[in-house]
Image (spheres, grey):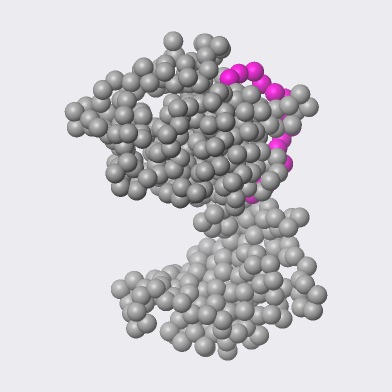
Amino acid sequence: MLRGGKTGKALSWICAALLVAAAPPAGTAATADPKGAVTAALDGLCPDGVEDPEKLEQALPGFVLSDVEDDGPADAWLRRRIRLVNAASDQALTATALRPGGTLRRLDVEVRVLSKDRPVMLALAGGDCRVFQARLLQYAEGRASEIAVLAPDLTREVGRELLDPPVPPGSDVRGVTVAHIDSGVNYLLPAIAGRLARSVEGKILGYDFWDLDPRPFDGDTGRSPFFPLRHGTEVASLLLREAPETRLVPLRYPRPDMARMSDVVATAAAAGAEIVLLPMGSTKQADWLAFEAAALAHPQLLFIVSAGNDGRDIDAVRPLYPAVLPLDNMIVVTSSDAEGLPAPGSNWGGTSVDLMVPAEDQPVIGFNGAASRGSGSSFAVPRVAALAARLKASHPAWGAAELKRAILARAVAPPAAARGAVAVGWIPQPGEVAD
C-alpha cells in the first residue's frame, strides 16, 4: 500500500521478548516451542529436504506435509514454499527456499499458531542453512505488541522493537493543526511527542485506524509482521523541521479495511485540521472510493498527496490512487532533483501531478531517533504541507482554496527537458519562509 518513499534511501525496515502464546483451543495440546520447530525444519531441509519435502515429515515428528508450491517449472523452480501442519501442537510451519541459478541461496522458516493463523517466529538462513537472523513476536491482549530480535543461536536476544506502546503523557500545543495519514509515527521520540495534538485532558487526537485504538504507532505490517515498514516517522520529522509550528494529528491508515478512510478524514476534520498529508497510494481504485467521497464532503481540508515512486507517467500508463482523483481540494506532488528534473524513480503526470519539489536526500529523523536521509515523492509531501502550514500561520483566515492558490502561484516552469511532467510547475525552494 505505501508507495511514496524508496527503500534504501528513506524507508527504515527496522524491526521482543519471549513468546507469550495464546491459549490453544479445547482439545489440542499447548503450542510447542517454535524454536525447536525451526531448528528441526532447517535440519530436515538440508542437505536435500528442499528437493524431497516428504523427508521433512521424518525430521518433524507430528507434522504432516500440507502443500508444496513452486514458482517456475518443477525441474527448475526458483522459489519453493513447503507447508506442514501439526494439529496436536497447534502449529503451522512454512519453509520458503530461493534457488536462483539452480543453487540454494536462501531459506526462510516461519512458524504460526495454526488455529489462529497467527505468526509467531521467523528465521532467515543462507544457502548453507545457517541462520543469520530470527524474530519472535510477543502478543498482548490478542495483538502483536513487540518483536524480539534473536541471535543466530535462536536463544540470545539482541534487540527489541515495540509495535503498540501507549502514548506518553503530555499537553496540547499551539500551532497549525495538520493531519498525517500514514503508517503512524513513533510518538516515543521527544521531537514528535512534543508536537502532538491533544484534548484538554491530554489525550492524543490521532488514532490508529488499522488496529482501531488511540495508539497510531509507526509500523506497516502488511508485507511482513516481522519486518514492519517504518515510514510515517521520517515523513513527520521533515514536516516538523520545516514547519515547527505544526500541531500534529497522526492517523494510521486502515489497511485491513480501506472503507474506514471516511472515518479517517472525518477524524482529521474533527481535530481541527485544515491540511492533510497523504504520502501514500496504490493502484487499486476501489480502495480509495471512501476517501474520495470523504474528501468531497470536507472541502475545507487541503490534501497534499504523493504521486508515488514507480518511475512512470500515472496519466498514460497505470493510474495511482488517490493521486489521479479529480479533487479540487488536493495537490499532488512528486520529487525533483536539484535542477528541476523528475527524480529517478518518481512518478509524473502532466494532468494528475501538480507540482515537483526537490525531495531527494532530505534530512529526516528515522524511526529509531537517529538522523537519516529520505528521498522520493513521500518526502515531497511534507515539504509542500509545511509550506501550507507556514502560509496558514501567516494567514489564519485562509481556507483550502486560498492555500492551494498561494502554493501553486509559487511554481515556476521546470526546465525544458521536464516540460509536460507536471500540470503546474516546479517550486525550487519550498522551505523558504512563506509570505
Give the x, y percent position of residue 428.
32, 23
Residue found 66% across the figure and 28% down from its top: 270
Residue found 40% across the figure and 39% down from its top: 324
Q: Nearer the viewer, residue 365 or 131?
A: 365
* Residue sitting farthest toward the left: 416
* Residue sitting farthest toward the right: 26
Q: Examine the structure image and report whether residue 173 is included in the region drawn in magenta.
A: yes
Residue found 71% across the figure and 35% down from its top: 168
Q: Nearer the viewer, residue 293 or 335?
A: 293
Give the x, y percent position of residue 56.
54, 85
The answer to whether 167 appears left or right of 347 in the picture is right
Residue found 35% across the figure and 28% down from its top: 355
> Magenta-highlighted stretch: main secondary structure?
loop
Answer yes or no: is residue 79 visible: yes
Q: Examine the structure image and report whether residue 271 is included in the region drawn in magenta.
A: no
* Vertical arrangement, residue 422 with respect to residue 287, above or below: above
Give the x, y percent position of residue 397.
55, 11
Give the x, y percent position of residue 10.
43, 41
| Quadrant for the C terminus in the image | top left
Q: Which residues are magenta?
A: 162-176
* Vertical arrangement, residue 319 with respect to residue 334, above or below: below
